[in-house]
Amino acid sequence: MDDTVRYQPPDAVRDRAPYPVRRGSRDTVRRRSPNAPPRSFLWTRRIVLTLLAVFALTPVYVMLSSSLKPLKDVQGAFGWVPSALTPRPYIDIWHTVPLARYFLNSLIVAVSSTLCAVVVAVFAAYAISRYRFTGRRFFSVTVLSTQMFPGILFLLPLFLIFVGIGNTTGIALYGSRGGLVLTYLTFSLPFAIWMLIGYFDSIPHDLDEAALVDGCGPLGALLRVVVPAAVPGIVAVCVYAFMTAWGEVLFASVMTNDTTRTLAVGLQGYATQTDVYWNQVMAASLVVSVPVVAGFLLLQRYLVTGLTAGAVK
Amino acid sequence: MNRVLSRARSHPAAPGRPRTGPPRPPRLSRLRRAGLPYLLLLPALALELLVHLVPMTVGVVMAFKGLTQQYLRDWTTAPWAGLGNFRVAVDFDAPVGAALLRSFWVTCCFTVLAVGLAWLLGTAAAVLMQDRFRGRGLLRTAFLIPYALPVYAAVITWSFMFQRDTGLVNHVLHDQLGILGTPPFWLIGDNSFAALVTVSVWRSWPFAFLILTAGLQNIPRELYEAAAMDGAGVWQQIRRITLPALRPVNQVLVLVLFLWTFNDFNTPYVLFGKSAPEPADLISIHIYQSSFVTWNFGSGAAMSVLLLLFLLVVTAGYLLATARGRRETDG
């Protein structure tokens, strides 16, 4: 977790401290250079950042500690320290509701929609970044403005359209994972395209023109030159698309049935029982969070690099 | 555009094939080049049409229909209602309209508070963490965790913390600090608004932090060096260099935060369940209830259309105002 290893902005933007900074080595730590930030700044920083860290991490601590508590602990008044540690909730969660099935459904839906979203977004962003054509601006504006639509406005129409498609063509979109994949991949598309356009724009056009001269087709240039150069941006898009699909609740609650239910809906099964097994709820929450949080933390440096080069231009 | 698309389709294998063999006639390759961008856009376009634009059009049409449960098998057969649904929705003296107006007002207050606080915390964290110090990477990771957690897992944890008898919030405020006399309910009654704002801010400030951190990396370092040379202190550098340089990023960020917060469904839905308490009855939950709980889809659609119109007006106004502001500062 050392800062210099974990977090590497691209070369050009690395190390932009506004004033000479104290390095970690022992002999320089105590010495204050004339340009060092004043004490008021250092204390403000310490206090504000500590408070923010407490705010951010308290729920995580509650989740972790409560998931290891015996049932009587979570049924009485809250305590910061568990009276005893037990792995029991982690075993019970799989029986109380069919968590494994929900987990598998979520995984299938999230992975497929992420892969599709990235492929579709790469093509679209390449077209907008590298070609000038009629309708280019119109397309970008339209796609971005879909971000504005309240989900509630097209929830029911989409539901009816999926049912209609099922009735006329026999392709079951309502209640199937396919329908959910289709929906989620479209949710992450606008942001993905937007971010990749910025990223592709930052890759010199000479690179893919050289590939074209060397006899690659336009797609060859895209796949062999532009995509490899845009890996941080593409990874950032993957993280975003996966998180979108893994966390969506509204459409999951309407578009799924018992066999295709995802974690977003399934997790509420613990709370609708007559007794709420809070230790199990916390254990299940932790288990479903692990894939996304782990992935996010592993790839977060790509996310900032991707955002810097892409979206925040 | 259809013309170009059909042209593109008549050479389906063309884009992928490497250029080998004899050179093609120039006219053909010109056509192919013109069609290629549309072909690349086709999948994205088709998906946007299927999932966003067509359903939205259908939604607008539905708002003019008397659509109830009995027409659900084939919604096109529902009778036309003209402006009836809208008239009911904006009749603020009748119960339906009054409830919608109250929900709209709650959502406005909620959005202003939540976006403002999220932006403030995100800015403070990003600016204070601009230069290196020991533990910065670790802290940044910690700050991003609320953003990375799936919404239902995080919000369920918050609802546990807000429980009256077994939750952390009452334990700290009542048992440990003694601020509150009797332990209050947080998820029903007036306190539910505060609970909702807290959870929403907790979820969205890391996003502001992330975007602003990325934005800070585009500020040239020389600016700070020059300012330090001229004797500007840290606070002055933050006020004169950092904050003005973040303006373009902030303009987009605030808009995105506004739209997400205003349309937020997940947070109240997981926190309160299907029926939110009145003080925290956000508009999207309200419309969801009017559609799926009372099975009156026509009026739900009409309310959604009104919501969309409101968002369109606000967004357009915001974009115009910021564009004018930018022109003035540039010129």
Image (cartoon, coloured by chain):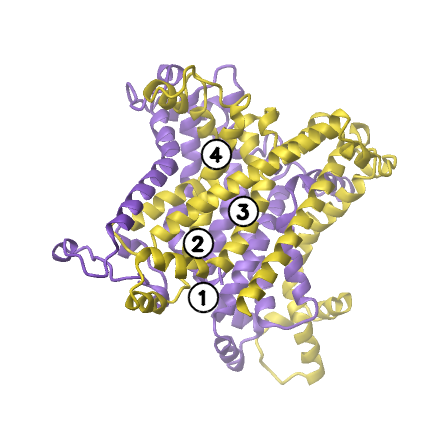
Chain colours: A purple, B yellow
Quadrant including the C terminus of chain B:
bottom right
Can residue B276 be seen by looking at this rendering?
Answer: no
Instruction: Answer few, some or many: residues within 10 Å of disc 4's Cα (few below 14, many 20 plus, some between 14 and 19).
Output: some
Residue ID for mark 4: B199
Residue ID for mark 2: B212
Residue at disc 4, secondary structure: helix
- What's the chain of the residue with tag 3? B
Of mark 4 and mark 2, the one earlier in the sequence is: 4
Identity, as a three-letter code, of the amino acid under mark 3: Leu
- What's the chain of the residue with tag 2? B
User: x and y percent of residue A307 in the render?
Assistant: 46, 58
Residue occupying the point 33% across, 66% down: B227
Q: How far apart are marks 1 and 3 (CA)?
A: 32 Å
Q: Which mark is residue A228?
A: 1
Marks 4 and 2 close (CB-CB < 8 Å) = no
Residue at disc 3, secondary structure: helix
Q: Which of B48 and B94 is in front in this view?
A: B94
